[in-house]
Image: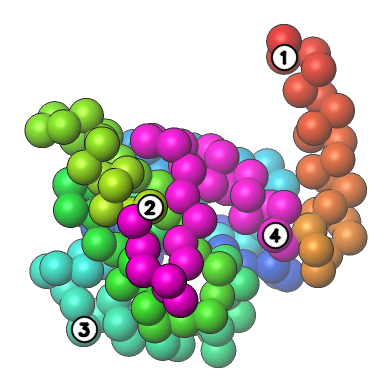
Amino acid sequence: MIEKNNKKGARVAIMMGSVSDRQVMDAAADILGQFGIDYEVKISSAHRMPNKTREFVLNAENEGFEVIIAGAGKSAHLPGVIASYTTIPVIGVPVKTDDLGGLDSLLSIVQMPPGVPVATVAINGSKNAALLAVQILGLKYPDIKNKFREYKKGLEHVV
């Protein structure tokens, strides 16, 4: 499954291992959309579709992706598998599970070996994953950095 918003400029891939992760990961798409950042949503399991996942990640940089946000539950290997194939920053989103409340997902993502970093946010924290992607892209794109500054200023009114 692929969803594109077809904007120009910075590109982020939002990946998840299962359709059941979609509700959690939609918050990332919403944030990226608010910042006008082009994104593509893909469902590709590290366990059930390893070849498809590998192929996408190996081509991601050539396709213009600059950050990958990957959400996964249970054994949550997707973010780590992605990070093993690319130098693009990978942000992992542990998805809450019925079994262990997402702690299994969190530990699977955060405990990466040296040399294969995955930035990891809170359980079901795809909104913060997208905001981290915005910050990363802001290093290259001044307009994104300025929008993020305004977003941060606006947080004063949320409190």
Residue 83 or 1: which is nearer the viewer? 83
Label 2, residues with CA under 10 Å away: few <14, some 14-19, many ≥20: some
Please give the name of the residue rendered at 81% of the width and 68% of the height, measured from the top-left corner. 140
Q: Amino acid at mark 4?
A: Ile
Q: Is residue 117 above or below residue 70?
A: below
What span is in magenta? 111-137
Please give the name of the residue rendered at 36% of the width and 68% of the height, measured from the top-left corner. 113
Which mark is first along the chain, 4 or 3?
3
> Circle 3 is placed at which residue position?
51
Please give the name of the residue rendered at 57% of the width and 48% of the height, measured from the top-left corner. 130
Which mark is first along the chain, 3 or 1?
3
Q: Between label 2 and label 1, give the one nearer the viewer.
A: 2
| The stretch drawn in magenta includes residue 123 | yes
Q: Is residue 5 above or below residue 33?
A: below
Q: Amino acid at mark 1?
A: Val
Q: Secondary structure at mark 3?
A: helix
Q: Amino acid at mark 2?
A: Val
| The stretch drawn in magenta includes residue 151 | no
> Circle 1 is placed at which residue position?
158
The number of discs equals 4
For the residues bearing labels 1 and 3, Cβ distance under 8 angstroms: no
Q: CA distance from mark 2 to mark 1?
A: 29 Å
Q: Is residue 90 visible?
A: yes
Q: Amino acid at mark 3?
A: Asn
For the residues bearing labels 1 and 4, Cβ distance under 8 angstroms: no
Residue 15 or 47: which is nearer the viewer? 47
